[in-house]
Amino acid sequence: MEVTKKRPKQKIGSELNLKATKKRPTQKIAEGTKGKVFAVELSSTDRRVQNGENIFRVEKEATIGRSPDCDIVILDEYVSRKHAQIFIKDGKAYIKDLLSSNGTFFQERPVLQQMQIEEDGTLRVDTVEFNIKTLSV
């Protein structure tokens, strides 16, 4: 079982000194039915978000976490290795917490299992915020 530090009630501790990982290629957008979500765009200016980008497009699914295996890597010791997952199912976008130690929040509500992502919301992984935009056909 993965051990992630619980966030103290103070400011962020020292950051991990990890290197950015290689980018995964963007998948081709499949034709969808009118009104269905086909992608989710995440944007953040937080310097702890790696992968060399500030905007990430999720067309099927993406994991967020500290591990270099994640699609969106956050270099912070209070982010779990595999912290959360965004996925698209039946034309709707969802966020799922992967049993992280410090939680995942959408619109400041805790994501306890999985939650549908609403239009133009804010996702928070520990203290890192992402602006979310759903892209529909």
Image (tube, rainbow, N blue to C red):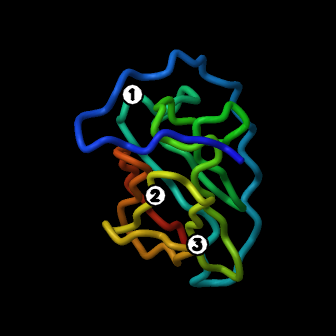
Q: CA distance from mark 1 to mark 3?
A: 26 Å
Image position, residue 81 (x, y; %): 63, 41
Which residue is at a point 58% across and 56% down the rendered structure image?
Answer: 84
Under tag 3, what secondary structure? strand
Image position, residue 70 (x, y; %): 67, 41
Q: Is residue 127 visible?
A: yes
Q: Nearer the viewer, residue 68 or 93?
A: 68
Q: Nearer the viewer, residue 16 or 30?
A: 16
Q: Which residue is mark 2?
A: 103
Which comes sooner in the sequence, label 1 or label 2? 1
Q: CA distance from mark 3 to mark 2?
A: 19 Å
**Number of numbered callouts drawn:** 3
Under tag 1, what secondary structure? loop
Q: CA distance from mark 1 to mark 2?
A: 20 Å
Which residue is at a point 42% across and 22% down the rendered structure image?
Answer: 15
Q: Does residue 55 appear left or right of residue 27 in this picture? A: left
Mark 1 or 3: the one toward you: 1
Name the amino acid type tagged 2: Gly
Q: In the rendering, which numbered label is found on residue 47?
A: 1
Around disc 1, counting alpha carbons within 10 Å, would you say few (fewer than 14), some (14 to 19), or many (20 or more)?
Answer: few
